Amino acid sequence: MNKKVLLTGISGYIGNHCAVELLKNGYSVRGSVRSLSKSEKVIAVIKKEVDPKDNLEFCELDLLSDDGWDDAMKGCEFVLHVASPFIILEPKDENEYIRPAVDGTIRALKAAKKAGIKRVVLTSSMVSMLEDADKSIDINFESWTNVNAKNVNAYAKSKTLAEQAAWDFIRAQTDAKPMELSVVNPGPVYGPTLSGDLSGASMGMFKQIMSGKMPMVAQAAINMSDVRDIAKIHVLALENENSNGKRFIVATEKAHKFQEIAQYIKSNGYDKISTRLAPNFLLNFIGNFDREARSMKTFIGKTYDGDVSSTMETFNWKPISLEKTVLDTIKSIESFA
C-alpha cells in the first residue's frame, strides 16, 4: 500500500505541482481544499500530468478553523503543508496575512503531532531570511528576517512568523520520538501553471511584462525559483534522513535581477517589453499610496543572494536555469491565454 501524504493547498500553483510529483513518486495523496467543490477541477488538472488511479482523495480544511484537521490526518504518514495566503496587494491590515499563516501552520502541526505523523515538510520562503531587509545581503539557512525592520512587508512577516512558530513547536516536544520538520524556502516562484490560473502573483507579473503593461522593472535581484524544483524538493524531503530539522533554499544558484526576466521574455519575440529600470526613489514614493508597489518595497535596490549549496548536496539536485523557467512560463501562459 502506498504511503499517504496530506497535502494542504492542493488547488494552488505550488500545490498542483506537489500533487503531481507525489503521485509520480508512488505516494497516495489526500489534498485539502477550502471547498470540496474545487476537487473536480483539481482532478482534471492532475490527470493531464499523471493518472492518479485510486491514489487521490480530498478533504475540506480552513487555515482559520479547527474543523476537519484530525480526520484529515487519519491514515497519513507525512504532511506537506503548502497552504498559505498570498495576495499581490499589501493588505490594509497585516493580520490578513499573518493570522492565517501562523495559526494555520500551528493548527497543521498540532493535528499532525496528535495523529503520530512522522514528518512535516513546510513551505516557507526566502522572505523569511532577509535579516533587516534594509541592505543587500548573502542569505543562508541561518538567516532570519527581522519582522520589526522598517521595510518588511506583511507577506514577509507572515512567512517569518509562521516558520518561527513551526520551529518553536518542534523544539518544544518532549517525547522520545518527536515529530520531524523540514522547511523549503523558495525565492519568487515561476514556471508553468498546470491549472491555467493566471491571476496569481507569479503568472500576473509575467502577463504584465509580456503585454508591455509594465513600463519599468524594479531594480532588485534575488534567487528565482522554478515551481517544478520546489515540488521536487518537497517530495524528496519527506524521507531523506539528512533533511530533518533543516531549512532549504530552493532556487537558482545565484541571484538574478527582475530585469533579466524581462530581457529573456523580450528576446523571445515580445518586443513591446520595457527592460528599463524604475528609479528606486520613484518606487519607494509610489509605495506610500499604492498597495502593489508597497509590497515590493522590501526588495527595491537590493540584492539578496541565497546559498543553495546545502540543498544541492543533500538532494543531489541541480536547479533549473532561469532561462528555461522563463521560456516554459511563457509557453504555459500562451497555451492558456
Image (spheres, rainbow, N blue to C red):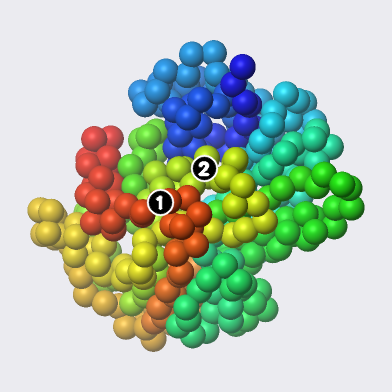
Which structural element holds mark 2? helix
Residue 80 x %, y % = 61, 40
Q: Quadrant of the C terminus?
A: top left
Residue 26 x %, y % = 51, 25
Is 98 or 78 nearer to us in this picture?
78
Note whether 336 is above or below 157 in the view shown. Answer: above
Image quadrant in which you'd find residue 312: bottom left
Is 62 or 221 nearer to us in this picture?
221
Image quadrant in which you'd find residue 3: top right
Residue drawn at point x = 36 percent, y = 54 percent? 318
Residue drawn at point x = 19 percent, y = 57 percent? 265
- How crowded pointer 1 is (Cα within 10 Å; few <14, some 14-19, many 20+) is rated as some
With 16 as the anchor, is 211 left or right in this view? Answer: left
**Are circles 1 and 2 on residues that touch, CB within 8 Å?**
yes
1 or 2: tag closer to the N-terminus: 2
The residue that label 1 is drawn on is: 317
Residue drawn at point x = 42 percent, y = 74 percent? 305
Do we see residue 336 in this rendering? yes
Do we see residue 63 in this rendering? no
Residue drawn at point x = 42 percent, y = 18 percent? 51
Residue 28 x %, y % = 57, 24
Residue 32 x %, y % = 62, 31
Q: Amino acid at mark 2?
A: Leu
Q: Amino acid at mark 1?
A: Trp
Is 196 or 292 nearer to us in this picture?
196
Which numbered tag is attached to residue 236? Answer: 2
